[in-house]
Image: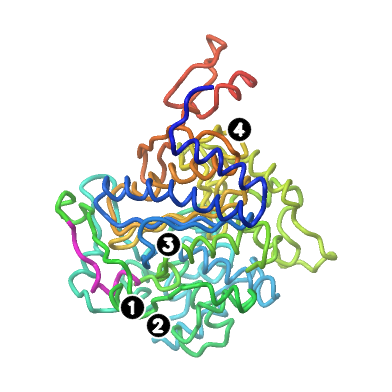
Amino acid sequence: MPALSASRTCLVVLGASLAAGSAAGTASAAAALQKRLQEIAVEKQELYNCSIGIAVETGAGLVVSAGNDGSFAWGSVTKLATGAALMQQVAARRISLDTPVAPLIDPLLVREGLGRMHVLFGPRADSITLEHLLAMKSGIPDYDTATPYPPPPTDAFRKAVYAQPAAEWPPARLLNLSYVRKGKLEFEPGAHWAYSSTNFVLAGLLLARLSNATRWDAYGQAALLSPLPAQRRSSYALDFASHGTPAAHGAVRGFDRTSYNGANASARPGVDVSDVAGVFGGWTASDIVAPPASVARLVYDLFGASGPRLLARQYVDEMIPGARDAAGGGQSDWARGAPLSGGRVASAASRRLEAARGRFGARSDVDSHRMEDIYGLATFNLSIMGVTGQSSLSPYAVSYGHLGATYGYDSIAAYFPAIDAAVSIGTSIETDSQTAPSDTLCLVYNALLAAVRGTAEPRCSFSKESYFGGRCDCGNTYACHKLLRKCVKSELGSLSKEDCSRTC
Protein backbone atom coordinates (compact mmCIF):
# COMPACT_ATOMS: atom_id res chain seq x y z
CA MET A 1 0.00 0.00 0.00
CA PRO A 2 1.49 3.40 -0.95
CA ALA A 3 2.42 5.82 1.80
CA LEU A 4 -0.26 8.34 2.68
CA SER A 5 0.21 12.01 3.46
CA ALA A 6 -0.85 13.20 6.92
CA SER A 7 -4.01 14.71 5.49
CA ARG A 8 -4.88 11.53 3.59
CA THR A 9 -4.27 9.35 6.66
CA CYS A 10 -6.54 11.66 8.61
CA LEU A 11 -9.29 11.19 6.04
CA VAL A 12 -9.08 7.40 6.15
CA VAL A 13 -9.52 7.59 9.92
CA LEU A 14 -12.39 9.99 9.34
CA GLY A 15 -14.17 7.47 7.15
CA ALA A 16 -13.92 4.84 9.87
CA SER A 17 -15.31 7.31 12.40
CA LEU A 18 -18.26 8.09 10.17
CA ALA A 19 -18.98 4.41 9.71
CA ALA A 20 -18.96 3.93 13.47
CA GLY A 21 -21.78 6.43 13.73
CA SER A 22 -21.20 7.34 17.41
CA ALA A 23 -21.44 10.90 18.68
CA ALA A 24 -17.75 10.83 19.53
CA GLY A 25 -16.95 9.45 16.10
CA THR A 26 -19.01 12.13 14.37
CA ALA A 27 -17.29 14.86 16.39
CA SER A 28 -13.89 13.43 15.53
CA ALA A 29 -14.88 13.15 11.88
CA ALA A 30 -16.06 16.73 11.79
CA ALA A 31 -12.81 17.98 13.31
CA ALA A 32 -10.69 16.00 10.85
CA LEU A 33 -12.71 17.11 7.85
CA GLN A 34 -12.75 20.72 9.03
CA LYS A 35 -8.95 20.68 9.20
CA ARG A 36 -8.68 19.41 5.62
CA LEU A 37 -11.28 21.83 4.28
CA GLN A 38 -9.51 24.69 6.03
CA GLU A 39 -6.33 23.71 4.18
CA ILE A 40 -8.24 23.85 0.90
CA ALA A 41 -9.80 27.20 1.81
CA VAL A 42 -6.42 28.73 2.61
CA GLU A 43 -4.90 27.34 -0.60
CA LYS A 44 -7.67 28.70 -2.81
CA GLN A 45 -7.91 32.04 -1.01
CA GLU A 46 -4.22 32.57 -1.69
CA LEU A 47 -4.57 31.44 -5.30
CA TYR A 48 -7.51 33.72 -6.09
CA ASN A 49 -6.64 36.52 -3.64
CA CYS A 50 -10.15 36.60 -2.20
CA SER A 51 -12.32 35.35 0.64
CA ILE A 52 -13.75 31.85 0.25
CA GLY A 53 -16.30 30.19 2.50
CA ILE A 54 -16.96 26.44 2.50
CA ALA A 55 -19.74 24.48 4.19
CA VAL A 56 -20.76 20.83 4.22
CA GLU A 57 -23.87 19.16 5.65
CA THR A 58 -24.60 15.44 5.40
CA GLY A 59 -27.39 13.10 6.37
CA ALA A 60 -24.98 11.41 8.77
CA GLY A 61 -25.01 14.55 10.90
CA LEU A 62 -21.71 15.96 9.69
CA VAL A 63 -21.85 19.78 9.66
CA VAL A 64 -18.55 21.49 8.82
CA SER A 65 -17.50 25.00 7.80
CA ALA A 66 -14.10 26.32 6.71
CA GLY A 67 -12.60 29.52 5.40
CA ASN A 68 -14.59 32.73 5.76
CA ASP A 69 -17.82 32.06 7.65
CA GLY A 70 -19.26 35.51 6.92
CA SER A 71 -22.20 36.22 4.64
CA PHE A 72 -21.77 36.19 0.86
CA ALA A 73 -24.10 37.30 -1.91
CA TRP A 74 -25.15 34.08 -3.67
CA GLY A 75 -26.56 35.38 -6.95
CA SER A 76 -28.45 32.74 -8.90
CA VAL A 77 -28.26 30.16 -6.11
CA THR A 78 -31.37 32.11 -5.05
CA LYS A 79 -33.21 30.43 -7.92
CA LEU A 80 -33.11 27.14 -6.00
CA ALA A 81 -35.02 28.80 -3.16
CA THR A 82 -37.52 30.47 -5.47
CA GLY A 83 -38.11 27.26 -7.39
CA ALA A 84 -38.61 25.30 -4.17
CA ALA A 85 -41.07 27.93 -2.90
CA LEU A 86 -43.14 27.58 -6.04
CA MET A 87 -43.05 23.80 -5.83
CA GLN A 88 -44.42 24.19 -2.31
CA GLN A 89 -47.34 26.02 -3.91
CA VAL A 90 -47.72 23.14 -6.36
CA ALA A 91 -47.72 20.67 -3.46
CA ALA A 92 -50.41 22.77 -1.74
CA ARG A 93 -52.50 22.59 -4.95
CA ARG A 94 -52.60 26.35 -5.38
CA ILE A 95 -51.08 26.03 -8.84
CA SER A 96 -49.80 23.29 -11.16
CA LEU A 97 -46.81 23.20 -13.47
CA ASP A 98 -49.19 23.44 -16.43
CA THR A 99 -50.96 26.55 -15.15
CA PRO A 100 -50.65 29.63 -17.41
CA VAL A 101 -49.17 32.32 -15.17
CA ALA A 102 -50.39 35.49 -16.91
CA PRO A 103 -53.80 35.63 -15.17
CA LEU A 104 -52.03 35.45 -11.80
CA ILE A 105 -49.16 37.83 -12.55
CA ASP A 106 -51.06 40.43 -14.60
CA PRO A 107 -52.79 42.14 -11.64
CA LEU A 108 -49.44 42.78 -9.94
CA LEU A 109 -47.90 44.01 -13.19
CA VAL A 110 -50.75 46.48 -13.63
CA ARG A 111 -50.43 47.56 -9.99
CA GLU A 112 -46.75 48.26 -10.61
CA GLY A 113 -47.65 50.51 -13.53
CA LEU A 114 -46.75 48.03 -16.27
CA GLY A 115 -48.76 46.36 -18.99
CA ARG A 116 -50.01 42.81 -18.81
CA MET A 117 -47.85 39.88 -19.90
CA HIS A 118 -49.09 39.99 -23.50
CA VAL A 119 -48.32 43.72 -23.68
CA LEU A 120 -44.79 43.26 -22.36
CA PHE A 121 -43.90 40.10 -24.26
CA GLY A 122 -46.44 39.60 -27.04
CA PRO A 123 -49.64 37.54 -27.38
CA ARG A 124 -47.95 34.14 -26.96
CA ALA A 125 -46.90 35.18 -23.44
CA ASP A 126 -50.38 34.27 -22.26
CA SER A 127 -49.50 30.60 -22.86
CA ILE A 128 -46.41 30.66 -20.60
CA THR A 129 -46.81 28.18 -17.75
CA LEU A 130 -45.12 27.81 -14.39
CA GLU A 131 -43.00 25.01 -15.83
CA HIS A 132 -41.83 27.27 -18.65
CA LEU A 133 -40.62 29.85 -16.11
CA LEU A 134 -38.82 27.40 -13.83
CA ALA A 135 -37.29 25.40 -16.69
CA MET A 136 -36.01 28.47 -18.60
CA LYS A 137 -38.27 27.66 -21.55
CA SER A 138 -40.53 30.72 -21.62
CA GLY A 139 -38.80 32.73 -24.35
CA ILE A 140 -38.86 35.85 -22.14
CA PRO A 141 -35.83 38.12 -22.75
CA ASP A 142 -33.14 38.27 -20.07
CA TYR A 143 -32.59 41.56 -18.26
CA ASP A 144 -29.02 40.42 -17.56
CA THR A 145 -27.05 41.49 -20.63
CA ALA A 146 -23.70 39.88 -19.76
CA THR A 147 -22.27 38.72 -23.10
CA PRO A 148 -18.90 37.01 -22.57
CA TYR A 149 -18.59 35.71 -26.13
CA PRO A 150 -17.50 36.75 -28.68
CA PRO A 151 -14.87 39.05 -27.15
CA PRO A 152 -14.64 41.71 -25.99
CA PRO A 153 -17.13 41.00 -23.18
CA THR A 154 -19.93 43.55 -22.96
CA ASP A 155 -22.70 44.15 -20.43
CA ALA A 156 -25.04 47.11 -20.86
CA PHE A 157 -26.99 46.38 -17.68
CA ARG A 158 -23.81 46.24 -15.58
CA LYS A 159 -22.83 49.61 -17.02
CA ALA A 160 -26.19 51.09 -16.03
CA VAL A 161 -25.96 49.62 -12.52
CA TYR A 162 -22.47 50.99 -11.92
CA ALA A 163 -23.46 54.40 -13.27
CA GLN A 164 -26.03 54.68 -10.45
CA PRO A 165 -24.67 52.51 -7.62
CA ALA A 166 -27.26 53.63 -5.05
CA ALA A 167 -30.21 53.03 -7.38
CA GLU A 168 -32.32 49.94 -6.80
CA TRP A 169 -33.76 47.78 -9.56
CA PRO A 170 -37.18 46.56 -8.44
CA PRO A 171 -39.20 44.28 -10.74
CA ALA A 172 -41.08 47.13 -12.43
CA ARG A 173 -37.83 48.84 -13.41
CA LEU A 174 -36.29 45.62 -14.72
CA LEU A 175 -39.36 44.58 -16.67
CA ASN A 176 -39.66 48.06 -18.17
CA LEU A 177 -36.22 47.93 -19.80
CA SER A 178 -36.66 48.41 -23.53
CA TYR A 179 -34.84 45.19 -24.45
CA VAL A 180 -36.99 43.20 -22.00
CA ARG A 181 -40.47 44.57 -22.72
CA LYS A 182 -40.10 44.50 -26.48
CA GLY A 183 -43.54 43.08 -27.20
CA LYS A 184 -42.34 39.68 -28.36
CA LEU A 185 -40.73 36.52 -27.06
CA GLU A 186 -37.37 35.12 -28.11
CA PHE A 187 -39.10 31.86 -29.05
CA GLU A 188 -42.38 29.97 -28.67
CA PRO A 189 -42.90 28.91 -25.02
CA GLY A 190 -41.61 25.37 -24.54
CA ALA A 191 -39.87 25.20 -27.91
CA HIS A 192 -36.33 25.93 -26.73
CA TRP A 193 -34.18 26.54 -23.66
CA ALA A 194 -32.46 29.84 -22.88
CA TYR A 195 -31.17 31.03 -19.54
CA SER A 196 -33.08 34.15 -18.52
CA SER A 197 -33.15 35.53 -15.00
CA THR A 198 -36.28 37.49 -15.91
CA ASN A 199 -38.15 34.19 -15.53
CA PHE A 200 -37.39 34.25 -11.83
CA VAL A 201 -38.38 37.88 -11.37
CA LEU A 202 -41.78 36.88 -12.74
CA ALA A 203 -41.66 33.81 -10.50
CA GLY A 204 -41.30 36.17 -7.55
CA LEU A 205 -44.36 38.13 -8.65
CA LEU A 206 -46.23 34.86 -8.93
CA LEU A 207 -45.24 33.94 -5.37
CA ALA A 208 -46.34 37.38 -4.19
CA ARG A 209 -49.75 36.86 -5.77
CA LEU A 210 -50.14 33.31 -4.41
CA SER A 211 -49.29 34.55 -0.91
CA ASN A 212 -51.80 37.43 -1.23
CA ALA A 213 -49.11 40.11 -0.97
CA THR A 214 -50.31 43.51 -2.14
CA ARG A 215 -46.85 44.55 -3.39
CA TRP A 216 -43.87 42.66 -4.70
CA ASP A 217 -41.73 43.47 -1.64
CA ALA A 218 -44.50 42.49 0.78
CA TYR A 219 -43.87 38.86 -0.11
CA GLY A 220 -41.69 37.23 2.55
CA GLN A 221 -39.19 34.93 0.88
CA ALA A 222 -38.32 33.34 4.23
CA ALA A 223 -41.74 31.65 4.16
CA LEU A 224 -39.89 28.95 2.21
CA LEU A 225 -38.62 27.64 5.56
CA SER A 226 -42.06 27.39 7.18
CA PRO A 227 -42.39 23.57 6.76
CA LEU A 228 -39.35 23.07 9.01
CA PRO A 229 -39.57 22.71 12.80
CA ALA A 230 -38.99 25.97 14.70
CA GLN A 231 -35.63 24.83 16.03
CA ARG A 232 -34.41 23.99 12.55
CA ARG A 233 -35.65 27.31 11.17
CA SER A 234 -33.85 29.21 13.92
CA SER A 235 -30.53 27.68 12.83
CA TYR A 236 -30.69 29.54 9.52
CA ALA A 237 -29.10 32.93 8.88
CA LEU A 238 -30.70 33.54 5.48
CA ASP A 239 -31.20 37.16 4.47
CA PHE A 240 -33.21 38.11 1.38
CA ALA A 241 -32.02 41.47 0.08
CA SER A 242 -35.07 42.88 -1.68
CA HIS A 243 -33.70 46.35 -0.90
CA GLY A 244 -30.29 47.79 -0.09
CA THR A 245 -26.65 47.04 -0.82
CA PRO A 246 -24.27 44.23 0.13
CA ALA A 247 -22.79 46.43 2.86
CA ALA A 248 -26.24 47.15 4.27
CA HIS A 249 -26.85 43.41 4.57
CA GLY A 250 -23.50 42.68 6.20
CA ALA A 251 -22.03 40.80 3.25
CA VAL A 252 -18.33 40.10 2.89
CA ARG A 253 -16.82 42.82 0.70
CA GLY A 254 -17.07 41.66 -2.93
CA PHE A 255 -15.05 42.64 -5.98
CA ASP A 256 -15.80 42.62 -9.69
CA ARG A 257 -12.70 41.36 -11.54
CA THR A 258 -14.32 40.87 -14.91
CA SER A 259 -13.30 42.46 -18.20
CA TYR A 260 -16.82 43.54 -19.16
CA ASN A 261 -17.11 46.92 -20.84
CA GLY A 262 -13.35 47.31 -21.15
CA ALA A 263 -12.56 46.85 -17.45
CA ASN A 264 -9.10 45.66 -16.42
CA ALA A 265 -9.60 42.15 -15.04
CA SER A 266 -6.02 42.12 -13.70
CA ALA A 267 -6.52 45.13 -11.45
CA ARG A 268 -6.53 44.33 -7.73
CA PRO A 269 -8.58 44.23 -5.67
CA GLY A 270 -11.14 44.96 -8.43
CA VAL A 271 -14.31 47.04 -8.42
CA ASP A 272 -15.70 47.14 -4.88
CA VAL A 273 -19.45 46.41 -5.06
CA SER A 274 -20.20 46.87 -1.36
CA ASP A 275 -22.34 49.94 -2.02
CA VAL A 276 -23.88 48.81 -5.32
CA ALA A 277 -27.60 48.14 -4.87
CA GLY A 278 -27.85 46.52 -8.31
CA VAL A 279 -26.05 43.44 -6.97
CA PHE A 280 -29.54 42.35 -5.86
CA GLY A 281 -31.37 43.68 -8.92
CA GLY A 282 -32.88 40.32 -9.76
CA TRP A 283 -34.81 40.02 -6.45
CA THR A 284 -36.08 36.40 -6.39
CA ALA A 285 -33.52 35.55 -9.07
CA SER A 286 -30.48 36.63 -7.05
CA ASP A 287 -30.95 38.19 -3.62
CA ILE A 288 -29.82 35.65 -1.00
CA VAL A 289 -27.18 36.90 1.46
CA ALA A 290 -26.02 34.22 3.89
CA PRO A 291 -23.04 32.39 5.37
CA PRO A 292 -22.09 29.18 3.54
CA ALA A 293 -23.46 27.03 6.37
CA SER A 294 -27.00 28.33 5.85
CA VAL A 295 -26.81 27.73 2.10
CA ALA A 296 -25.52 24.18 2.57
CA ARG A 297 -28.38 23.59 5.01
CA LEU A 298 -30.88 25.02 2.53
CA VAL A 299 -29.61 22.65 -0.17
CA TYR A 300 -29.71 19.70 2.21
CA ASP A 301 -33.20 20.48 3.49
CA LEU A 302 -34.37 20.61 -0.12
CA PHE A 303 -32.62 17.58 -1.63
CA GLY A 304 -31.40 15.56 1.37
CA ALA A 305 -32.57 12.04 2.17
CA SER A 306 -33.24 12.43 5.90
CA GLY A 307 -34.52 14.86 8.48
CA PRO A 308 -37.16 17.58 8.10
CA ARG A 309 -37.96 18.57 4.55
CA LEU A 310 -38.79 21.77 2.72
CA LEU A 311 -40.70 19.80 0.11
CA ALA A 312 -42.11 16.29 -0.28
CA ARG A 313 -39.84 14.00 -2.29
CA GLN A 314 -42.19 13.62 -5.25
CA TYR A 315 -42.02 17.38 -5.84
CA VAL A 316 -38.26 17.54 -5.34
CA ASP A 317 -37.97 14.89 -8.05
CA GLU A 318 -39.77 17.25 -10.42
CA MET A 319 -36.91 19.72 -10.04
CA ILE A 320 -33.98 17.38 -10.75
CA PRO A 321 -32.79 17.54 -14.39
CA GLY A 322 -33.91 14.47 -16.30
CA ALA A 323 -34.77 12.48 -13.20
CA ARG A 324 -38.55 12.55 -13.49
CA ASP A 325 -38.43 10.98 -16.96
CA ALA A 326 -35.83 8.34 -16.10
CA ALA A 327 -37.31 7.46 -12.73
CA GLY A 328 -40.18 5.60 -14.37
CA GLY A 329 -43.45 7.32 -13.73
CA GLY A 330 -42.81 10.84 -14.91
CA GLN A 331 -44.20 13.84 -13.11
CA SER A 332 -46.64 13.65 -10.25
CA ASP A 333 -50.29 13.75 -11.28
CA TRP A 334 -51.09 16.97 -9.48
CA ALA A 335 -47.93 18.75 -10.69
CA ARG A 336 -49.01 18.02 -14.25
CA GLY A 337 -52.47 19.47 -13.60
CA ALA A 338 -54.28 16.10 -13.68
CA PRO A 339 -56.49 14.66 -10.92
CA LEU A 340 -54.63 12.77 -8.23
CA SER A 341 -54.52 9.02 -8.76
CA GLY A 342 -53.94 8.12 -5.15
CA GLY A 343 -50.69 8.95 -3.43
CA ARG A 344 -48.16 7.76 -6.00
CA VAL A 345 -44.59 8.68 -5.06
CA ALA A 346 -42.35 9.44 -8.04
CA SER A 347 -39.47 7.20 -6.96
CA ALA A 348 -37.59 5.74 -4.05
CA ALA A 349 -34.07 6.92 -3.26
CA SER A 350 -32.42 4.00 -5.03
CA ARG A 351 -34.50 4.54 -8.15
CA ARG A 352 -33.65 8.25 -8.16
CA LEU A 353 -29.98 7.43 -7.99
CA GLU A 354 -30.16 4.80 -10.71
CA ALA A 355 -32.15 7.19 -12.88
CA ALA A 356 -29.60 9.91 -12.37
CA ARG A 357 -26.74 7.55 -13.15
CA GLY A 358 -28.43 6.61 -16.38
CA ARG A 359 -29.04 10.16 -17.52
CA PHE A 360 -26.19 12.15 -16.01
CA GLY A 361 -22.62 12.15 -17.22
CA ALA A 362 -19.50 13.64 -15.69
CA ARG A 363 -18.40 15.18 -18.98
CA SER A 364 -18.10 18.96 -19.06
CA ASP A 365 -19.04 19.03 -22.74
CA VAL A 366 -22.33 20.80 -22.10
CA ASP A 367 -23.15 21.18 -25.78
CA SER A 368 -23.38 17.41 -26.24
CA HIS A 369 -26.34 17.12 -23.89
CA ARG A 370 -30.01 17.90 -24.31
CA MET A 371 -31.00 21.05 -22.44
CA GLU A 372 -33.56 19.01 -20.47
CA ASP A 373 -30.60 17.13 -19.01
CA ILE A 374 -28.69 20.32 -18.19
CA TYR A 375 -31.43 22.25 -16.40
CA GLY A 376 -34.51 20.94 -14.64
CA LEU A 377 -36.80 23.19 -12.62
CA ALA A 378 -34.61 25.85 -11.00
CA THR A 379 -31.83 23.25 -10.82
CA PHE A 380 -28.62 22.67 -12.78
CA ASN A 381 -27.21 19.24 -13.54
CA LEU A 382 -23.74 19.91 -12.15
CA SER A 383 -22.55 16.41 -13.12
CA ILE A 384 -21.94 17.40 -16.72
CA MET A 385 -20.18 20.58 -15.66
CA GLY A 386 -17.11 18.63 -14.64
CA VAL A 387 -17.02 19.43 -10.91
CA THR A 388 -16.88 15.95 -9.35
CA GLY A 389 -13.79 14.36 -10.88
CA GLN A 390 -15.47 10.96 -10.59
CA SER A 391 -15.89 8.32 -13.29
CA SER A 392 -19.01 9.14 -15.30
CA LEU A 393 -20.38 5.61 -14.71
CA SER A 394 -20.05 5.99 -10.96
CA PRO A 395 -22.90 7.12 -8.70
CA TYR A 396 -20.37 9.49 -7.14
CA ALA A 397 -20.38 11.53 -10.36
CA VAL A 398 -23.99 12.62 -9.81
CA SER A 399 -24.56 16.15 -8.55
CA TYR A 400 -27.19 18.84 -8.91
CA GLY A 401 -27.75 22.32 -7.49
CA HIS A 402 -27.05 25.78 -8.86
CA LEU A 403 -24.26 28.09 -9.95
CA GLY A 404 -24.32 31.61 -8.57
CA ALA A 405 -22.85 34.78 -10.03
CA THR A 406 -23.68 38.39 -9.38
CA TYR A 407 -21.63 41.56 -9.39
CA GLY A 408 -18.65 40.93 -7.12
CA TYR A 409 -19.48 37.34 -6.12
CA ASP A 410 -19.25 33.84 -7.66
CA SER A 411 -20.61 30.78 -5.87
CA ILE A 412 -21.92 27.24 -6.21
CA ALA A 413 -24.29 25.08 -4.17
CA ALA A 414 -24.38 21.34 -4.81
CA TYR A 415 -26.00 18.14 -3.59
CA PHE A 416 -24.40 14.71 -4.01
CA PRO A 417 -27.05 11.97 -3.64
CA ALA A 418 -24.64 9.03 -3.48
CA ILE A 419 -23.29 10.28 -0.14
CA ASP A 420 -26.34 12.36 0.87
CA ALA A 421 -24.28 15.53 1.23
CA ALA A 422 -24.72 19.22 0.45
CA VAL A 423 -21.78 21.54 -0.21
CA SER A 424 -21.74 25.31 -0.66
CA ILE A 425 -18.85 27.49 -1.81
CA GLY A 426 -19.04 31.28 -1.61
CA THR A 427 -16.37 33.65 -2.94
CA SER A 428 -15.82 37.40 -2.76
CA ILE A 429 -14.88 37.81 -6.42
CA GLU A 430 -16.61 37.70 -9.77
CA THR A 431 -14.44 36.78 -12.74
CA ASP A 432 -15.04 36.22 -16.45
CA SER A 433 -14.61 32.46 -16.09
CA GLN A 434 -16.30 32.02 -12.68
CA THR A 435 -13.62 29.44 -11.87
CA ALA A 436 -12.98 29.83 -8.13
CA PRO A 437 -16.12 28.10 -6.77
CA SER A 438 -15.87 25.08 -9.09
CA ASP A 439 -12.13 24.74 -8.51
CA THR A 440 -12.69 24.79 -4.76
CA LEU A 441 -15.60 22.35 -5.00
CA CYS A 442 -13.44 19.90 -6.97
CA LEU A 443 -11.10 19.52 -4.00
CA VAL A 444 -13.75 19.82 -1.29
CA TYR A 445 -15.99 17.14 -2.74
CA ASN A 446 -13.17 14.66 -3.23
CA ALA A 447 -11.90 15.27 0.29
CA LEU A 448 -15.42 14.73 1.61
CA LEU A 449 -15.94 11.64 -0.54
CA ALA A 450 -12.68 10.12 0.66
CA ALA A 451 -13.73 10.85 4.23
CA VAL A 452 -17.13 9.23 3.84
CA ARG A 453 -15.78 6.16 2.05
CA GLY A 454 -12.70 5.77 4.23
CA THR A 455 -10.31 5.91 1.27
CA ALA A 456 -7.26 7.97 0.42
CA GLU A 457 -8.01 11.38 -1.00
CA PRO A 458 -7.06 11.51 -4.71
CA ARG A 459 -4.89 14.21 -6.18
CA CYS A 460 -7.19 16.49 -8.12
CA SER A 461 -6.82 19.61 -10.22
CA PHE A 462 -9.36 21.80 -11.97
CA SER A 463 -9.31 23.55 -15.32
CA LYS A 464 -12.01 25.73 -16.84
CA GLU A 465 -13.21 24.61 -20.28
CA SER A 466 -16.31 26.67 -20.99
CA TYR A 467 -18.53 29.37 -19.50
CA PHE A 468 -20.60 26.79 -17.59
CA GLY A 469 -18.28 23.79 -17.56
CA GLY A 470 -14.83 22.74 -16.46
CA ARG A 471 -12.84 19.64 -15.63
CA CYS A 472 -12.06 18.31 -12.19
CA ASP A 473 -9.27 15.86 -12.99
CA CYS A 474 -8.78 13.19 -10.34
CA GLY A 475 -7.36 10.63 -12.77
CA ASN A 476 -10.67 9.42 -14.20
CA THR A 477 -9.78 10.43 -17.74
CA TYR A 478 -9.91 7.12 -19.60
CA ALA A 479 -11.85 6.54 -22.81
CA CYS A 480 -12.32 3.50 -25.01
CA HIS A 481 -10.32 3.80 -28.24
CA LYS A 482 -12.64 2.11 -30.73
CA LEU A 483 -9.95 1.30 -33.29
CA LEU A 484 -7.39 0.01 -30.81
CA ARG A 485 -10.10 -1.60 -28.71
CA LYS A 486 -8.41 -0.60 -25.51
CA CYS A 487 -8.64 2.09 -22.86
CA VAL A 488 -6.46 5.16 -23.25
CA LYS A 489 -6.06 8.41 -21.37
CA SER A 490 -7.78 11.18 -23.26
CA GLU A 491 -8.76 14.82 -22.91
CA LEU A 492 -12.29 13.62 -23.67
CA GLY A 493 -12.12 10.72 -21.25
CA SER A 494 -14.43 10.63 -18.24
CA LEU A 495 -14.05 7.06 -16.96
CA SER A 496 -11.95 5.36 -14.33
CA LYS A 497 -9.58 2.73 -15.68
CA GLU A 498 -11.75 0.00 -14.14
CA ASP A 499 -15.00 1.34 -15.63
CA CYS A 500 -13.38 1.79 -19.01
CA SER A 501 -11.94 -1.74 -19.02
CA ARG A 502 -15.30 -3.18 -18.09
CA THR A 503 -17.21 -1.38 -20.85
CA CYS A 504 -14.67 -1.03 -23.66
Residue extending furthest toward the right = 342
CB atoms at circles 4 and 1 under 8 Å apart?
no
Q: Is residue 417 left or right of residue 245?
A: right
Q: Which residue is mark 1?
A: 173
Query: Residue 337 at x, y = what percent?
Result: 71, 67
Q: Which residue is mark 2?
A: 114
Vertical comparison of 1 with 251: above or below: above
Q: Is residue 190 left or right of residue 244?
A: right
- Mark whose residue sits in front, 2 or 3: 3
Label 4, label 1: how many angstroms apart (C-alpha)?
47 Å
Q: Residue at x 16, y 54 (%)?
A: 268
Q: Amino acid at mark 4?
A: Leu
Q: Any magenta on residue 272? A: yes
Counting residues from the start of the chain, the first of labels 3 and 4 encountered is 3
What is the number of the mark on residue 145?
none
Counting residues from the start of the chain, the first of labels 2 and 4 encountered is 2
The magenta segment is 269-280
The C terminus: image quadrant:
top right
Q: Amino acid at mark 3?
A: Ser
241 or 336, which lies in front? 241
Counting residues from the start of the chain, the first of labels 2 and 1 encountered is 2
Using a 10 Å C-alpha cutoff, classify the residue at mark 1 as few (fewer than 14 neighbours), some (14 to 19) or many (20 or more).
few
Counting residues from the start of the chain, the first of labels 2 and 3 encountered is 3
Q: Which residue is mark 4?
A: 393
Using a 10 Å C-alpha cutoff, classify the residue at mark 4 as few (fewer than 14 neighbours), some (14 to 19) or many (20 or more).
some
Q: Secondary structure at mark 3?
A: helix
CB atoms at circles 3 and 4 under 8 Å apart?
no
**Hey, which quadrant is residue 164 in on the image?**
bottom left
Label 1, label 3: how many angstroms apart (C-alpha)?
19 Å
What is the number of the mark on residue 76?
3
Counting residues from the start of the chain, the first of labels 4 and 1 encountered is 1
